[in-house]
Amino acid sequence: MAFPVNFNGRKYDLKQFLRDHPGGVNTLKMFKGQSVGQVMEKYGHSTSAYHMLNDFKVENELKDYNLSGKVSDNGRIITNEESRRDVKEIAFLEELENRLDWSKPLLSQLDAIAPHYQKWVNSAVYRKCRLFKNPILESLTYTPWYLVPMFWIPIILYLGFVQFLEHVCCGDSCTSKSLTITQYLFHVALGVVIWTALEYSLHRWVFHLDPGASVTMIKIHFLIHGMHHKSCSSKDRNWSTPSSCAIFVQPRAALCRCYLTYDMIHYYVHHGSPKDGTYLYAMKRYHSNHHFVNYDKAYGISSKIWDHVFKTVVQVRTLGFSLHW
């Protein structure tokens, strides 16, 4: 069933976007069939949000503009809703988008937006993104959610068991002083702490590295993390592939376990439905802020600890009601 809304005299169908809306399904349902211009302004929607709205446009609709009387530089009459947002910025994002043919693989086209890559990649769209023409290469960029635990849990259990035998229950065969169970658990906890710092560091200084104007670096960045920001609604691309993660995760049980926890949390804060008052509810709103408002802050996904340490933490707006996804 369609979910029509009006904006700037034009109709949009938000049916596909309901579950992915950062503000929850319940907040959108109140505006079915109504104008959303004032509420988008009230809750401080980003330029990226207005840009993404174009992906839900209903074609062949008659426009009924509420005119403001103002005129743009090129002589076009500006509507009341347009006068309250950065129309030039949104128009420029549309111009960048039109340089690319989204029906064809994007990776080979990125040179067209290279000078403005950072602006383009951090302005999300709600579209399917094909990277490679080769179907085999393209298939390797998708990771179904169940593949991640299927791949990592056996490795975690094996490494944990082997290391427990080698360092705790080794008896006379110990190559060094054996560990007590308490010491072993301490090492596991230490792995968790190390991972939180590694998670933040990778996300901030590797995944968000500015590639500059180099087309090669832009393509590498887009493959590693850029496509996730540009099209974060893709469920099978919210994971890191097991092969790519093997580069970052050393073959130690604690780090592997932390990686799996991180990846599951990352998927859940995008596509799950946490309840108000829970830790993951707060992290879902926090991570949505990173995608749609402050892409250069809020790097923590499973924890905000290192955002506080490096002063990249953001304060998410306090609401007087619960969000539901």
Image (cartoon, grey):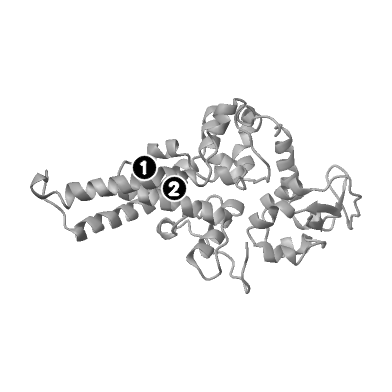
Residue 204 shown left or right of residue 139 in the figure:
left
Name, please, the residue furthest toward the top. Answer: 134
The x and y percentages for residue 106 are 64, 31
The residue depicted at 68 percent of the width and 29 percent of the height is: 104
The residue depicted at 62 percent of the width and 67 percent of the height is: 323
The x and y percentages for residue 310 are 42, 55
Label 2, label 1: how far apart the Cα atoms are: 15 Å
Residue 238 shown left or right of residue 46 in the figure:
left
The x and y percentages for residue 256 are 36, 47
Tell me if residue 246 comes above or below residue 89 in the rendering.
above
Residue 92 shown left or right of residue 214 in the figure:
right
Q: Quadrant of the C terminus?
A: bottom right
Task: Give, as a three-letter code, the residue at label 1.
Answer: Val
Name, please, the residue furthest toward the left. Answer: 172
Judge the density around disc 1: few (<14), some (14-19), many (≥20) Cα neighbours within 10 Å: some
Q: Which mark is residue 138?
A: none
Name, please, the residue furthest toward the bottom. Answer: 320
The x and y percentages for residue 51 are 71, 48
Judge the density around disc 2: few (<14), some (14-19), many (≥20) Cα neighbours within 10 Å: some
SS under mark 1: loop
Q: Quadrant of the N terminus?
A: bottom right
Mark 2 highlights which residue? Answer: 149
Q: Nearer the viewer, residue 46 or 323?
A: 323
Mark whose residue sits in front, 2 or 1: 2
Work out whether residue 207 can be spotted: yes
The residue depicted at 22 percent of the width and 55 percent of the height is: 184
Work out whether residue 213 can be spotted: no
Mark 1 highlights which residue? Answer: 249
SS under mark 2: helix
Q: How many marks?
A: 2
The residue depicted at 44 percent of the width and 39 percent of the height is: 242
Task: Give, as a three-letter code, the residue at label 2.
Answer: Pro
